[in-house]
Image (spheres, rainbow, N blue to C red):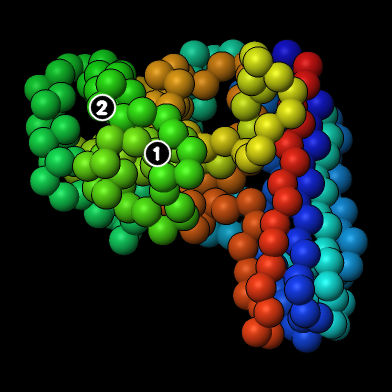
């Protein structure tokens, strides 16, 4: 499947910003499930400072705002051919050790409810079947609902509340998998929705390591393993590592953000 993707983030500031620096992770890699044909990241109102690969082998860029900017726009766009591998990514060609993905973070730290969820599937064998049961269990316990959580909501809080967005369901999956001694990571990327090309945000799902298969993707928000409608962009322990855009700025004013994502075949 060939997908055409456009992702624009526009920041508006009510007072001029003297200094701001943002980190972009907006460039998808080519691999076993996708081939990137062309990809461009452009910025208006900012300058590219440096590009590098981070510790998770994500392509990262640092951009600096023009002094006293009141608006900045960042657009990533290109075409990617995807392949349906039933969610199997395979083995990484990077030097990042597996144990890195066994560490919990402040956002994935398990509490009583996540421990109970992990215990409920702990006896399922083989591991890949266990992970499918875990994905199904999360989907049954949590309702996809916008506006109830934010980027600082923890996995335990979201599971206890019983609702959240793709990020929250992914956190719960990652937290429970790690609790079961299965390396797991957070993935940010894009999903072609069947009900329309225009979207309000990018997507998130999880990948877990299974002996003999390598990394396998699981999307608890949609209760499926990623197929040809998914494009992987960045990975990490949680959203903070794989966020499309993050940064710092000086100044006392407020900002508003407009995001437009379009994924079409």
User: Any mark on residue 110, and which?
Assistant: none
**Image coordinates for residue 147, horizontal then vertical, percent:** 48, 44
Crowdedness of circle 1 by 10 Å Cα count: few (<14), some, many (20+)?
A: many
> Between residues 91 and 76, which one lies in front from this camera angle?
76
> Between residues 48 and 264, which one lies in front from this camera angle?
264
Task: Name the residue rendered at 11%, 46% in the picture.
Answer: 112
Crowdedness of circle 2 by 10 Å Cα count: few (<14), some, many (20+)?
A: some
Q: In this view, does 243 lie above or below 255?
A: above
Task: Name the residue rendered at 66%, 22% in the picture.
Answer: 192
Quadrant where the N terminus is found in the figure: top right
**Image coordinates for residue 20, horizontal then vertical, percent:** 72, 77
Quadrant where the C terminus is found in the figure: top right
**Image coordinates for residue 36, horizontal then vertical, percent:** 77, 32
Task: Name the residue rendered at 58%, 45% in the picture.
Answer: 234
Q: Which of marks 2 and 1 is nearer the N terminus?
A: 2
**Image coordinates for residue 10, horizontal then vertical, percent:** 78, 56
Q: Give the left or right position of residue 36, taking residue 145 as reference.
A: right
Q: Give the left or right position of residue 258, taking residue 85 as reference.
A: right
Disc 2 marks which residue? 141
Query: Is residue 94 visible to the viewer in this orientation of the structure?
Result: no
Q: In which quarter of the view is residue 104 placed?
A: bottom left
Query: Is residue 129 visible to the viewer in this orientation of the structure?
Result: yes
Check disc 1 and report its element: helix, strand or loop. strand
Task: Name the residue rendered at 70%, 57% in the picture.
Answer: 257
Q: Give the left or right position of residue 247, taking residue 225 as reference.
A: right
Q: What is the count of numbered marks?
A: 2
Q: Distance between the residues labelled 2 and 1?
A: 11 Å
Q: In this view, does 198 lie above or below 225?
A: below
User: Any mark on residue 164, and which?
Assistant: 1
């Amino acid at each position: 499947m060939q997908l055409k993707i456009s992702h624009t983030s526009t920041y508006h500031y009510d007072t001029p910003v003297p200094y701001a620096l943002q980190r972009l992770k907006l460039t998808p890699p080519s691999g076993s499930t996708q081939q990137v044909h062309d990809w461009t990241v452009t910025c208006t109102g900012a300058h590219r400072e440096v590009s590098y690969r981070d510790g998770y082998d994500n392509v990262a860029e640092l951009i600096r705002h023009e002094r006293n900017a009141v608006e900045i726009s960042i657009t990533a766009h290109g075409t990617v051919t995807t392949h349906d591998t039933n969610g199997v990514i395979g083995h990484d060609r990077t030097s990042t050790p597996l144990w890195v993905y066994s560490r919990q973070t402040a956002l994935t730290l398990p509490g009583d409810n996540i421990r109970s969820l992990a215990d409920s599937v702990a006896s399922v064998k083989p591991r890949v079947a266990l992970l499918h049961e875990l994905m199904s269990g999360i989907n049954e316990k949590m309702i996809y609902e916008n506006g109830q959580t934010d980027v600082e909501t923890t996995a335990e809080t979201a599971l206890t509340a019983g609702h959240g967005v793709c990020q929250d369901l992914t956190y719960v999956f990652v937290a429970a998998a790690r609790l079961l001694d299965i390396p797991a990571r957070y993935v940010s990327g894009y999903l072609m929705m069947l009900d329309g090309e225009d979207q309000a945000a990018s997507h998130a799902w999880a990948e877990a390591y299974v002996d003999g298969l390598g990394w396998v993707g699981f999307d608890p928000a949609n209760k499926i393993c990623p197929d040809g409608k998914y494009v992987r962009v960045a990975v990490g322990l949680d959203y903070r590592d794989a966020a499309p855009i993050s940064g710092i700025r000086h100044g006392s004013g407020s900002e508003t953000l407009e995001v437009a994502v379009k994924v079409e075949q």
